[in-house]
Amino acid sequence: MLAKVSVRAAVLDLLRGFNITTLFGNPGSTELPLFLDFPADFRYVLGLQESVVVGMADGYAQATRNASFVNLHSAVGVGHAMGNIFTAHKNRTPVIITAGQQARSILPFDPFLFSAQATELPKPYVKWSCEPARAEDVPLAIARAYYIAMQEPRGPVLVSVPADDWDKLTERVLPRVVSTESRPEPRVLAQIGAALDASARPAFVIGAAVDRGNAWNEVLQLAERHNARVWTAPMSGRCGFPEDHRLFAGFLPAMREAIVSLLGGHDLIFAIGAPAFIYHVEGAGPHVPPGATLYQLIDDPTIAAWTPVGTSAVGSIRLGVLDLLARPAPAPRALPASRATLPRAEPSVPMSTAYVLQTLAEVREPASIVVEEAPSARAPMHDYLPILRSETFYTMCSGGLGHSLPAAVGVALAKPGARVIGLVGDGSAMYSIQALWSAAQLRLPITFVILKNRRYAALQEFAPAFGFRPEDQLEGTALPDLDFVALAKGHGCDAVHVSDAAQLHEVLRQALRSTSPILVEVDVA
């Protein structure tokens, strides 16, 4: 019989076994017992608001390809964090969330700051939630949470832990080997492979699960084998294909009719690691062009279930593509037409977003990592800031603001020495501006670029769909008088403002050499 240890010691030993020694949190009274005699080999990363905490943990988990560990404060902390818990759910990010609960002995009396329905609060945006029946079961619950979080499709989980559980005695729980990937059904892959071989004009639609599933190289090889035109799926949170490649065709918008139009002329559409398709506005008509058949390889069975037409294989993207590559090579196929070259963006007063992103593309290293949340800049980013390598682009799949500024901190923590660029709009930045403090305290080499257009500009793109005319005023969208240089310096970050296009290149070049976080506020039209 092994000697019993405290729940605290058992959990920390278990986390070591999972290679998790970085904890993210914003502590409250019900969480303090976890940190008694906090071990020297663990690192606690403090965020100044719970949504920031989960955003950092999301970026860290994506960049390490391992679950991250978050500690939140009871119901109110989980409530503050729900926006980025939702984003972690949409990003398919494995995050183990522990939420403090009041001591078991006073739960019958509705104590101050307790969580009345702790396991229900985060639903439906966690894969699993639990408040163990006994203190002794906490390590087992966290072990189960880890295995569930890491199984594809990955995602956040929550364990509610009463404050007096940590000191109780229990048995150690040893880490187990639990598989995280499932191979797609061979029969369905054979159908997809045969259809690909017979296709005359195939198109691939690449989603976030390609890079998330470590399948970048395999998908590139498959596209080159079939000379398929490659599109990026609507609202993709990762880049799954080099955007300077001869086969790259561009980005699909989240509009049914526009997708059908852009994919016109292809006889086969193969969605790899992507929903088919994400829509943002109401549409009508077919989901694929006339004469085209739709095939899908996806890691999430719920997505396969709602895909409106075609054939879907469910399982690991990487393993599925490897199986397709194992088939005999098809007959040679002519190269499709290449993507049109866009004219250069020219300097102006004020600068265009396109010019800023073009300049950033020219001065950054290809291996630098862009963590983006600038919705109104997405179109010019696609045109002027190409992503060229695996694991160098992250954004939110949810559309919820407040993720990417703290996620940049998490990515930088996970990849020491890498240059991380937090490309964020001024409206988005204000959802989680406190992350600048964490970046400054950790002295991370992050260059935050704030595109300052003084409004929620993305809303103007959707206004016509709701009957607004160009001359109509959109209430609640103006953002005057924000000073991000002052905000950054107030959080301990260096900062600089630039409004002159002639200075932009040198300002960005110097900022990308900084060994500590720096914010560049850029005025754009």
Image (cartoon, grey):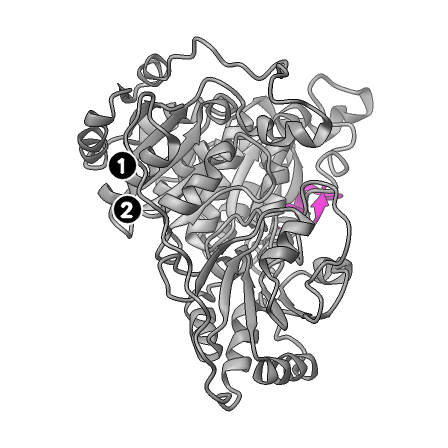
Residue 277's disc number: none
Residue visible at 71% across and 16% down?
112
Mark 1–mark 2 CB contact (< 8 Å): yes
Nearest the eye: 19 or 522: 522
Residue visible at 59% across and 31% down?
461
Nearest the eye: 233 or 409: 233
Residue 445's disc number: 1
Residue 340 % position (x, y): 40, 56
Whichever of callouts 1 and 2 sits on the residue coming sooner in the sequence is 2
Q: Which residues are magenta?
A: 128-139
Asked if the magenta segment contains residue 323, the reply would be no
Residue visible at 51% across and 78% down?
322
How far apart are labels 1 and 2 at the CA level?
8 Å
Classify residue 210 as left or right of residue 255: left
Query: Does 189 appear above or below 211?
Result: below
Give the SS element for disc 2: loop
Nearest the eye: 121 or 273: 273
Asked if the magenta segment contains residue 137, the reply would be yes
- The residue under label 2 is 418
Query: Amino acid type of disc 2?
Result: Ala
Classify residue 182 as left or right of residue 9: right
Q: Quadrant of residue 242?
A: bottom left
Local crowd at mark 1 within 10 Å, few (<14), some, or many (≥20)?
A: many
| Quarter of the figure that contains the C terminus | top left
Residue visible at 55% across and 66% down?
204
Nearest the eye: 389 or 64: 389
Residue 38 % position (x, y): 43, 35
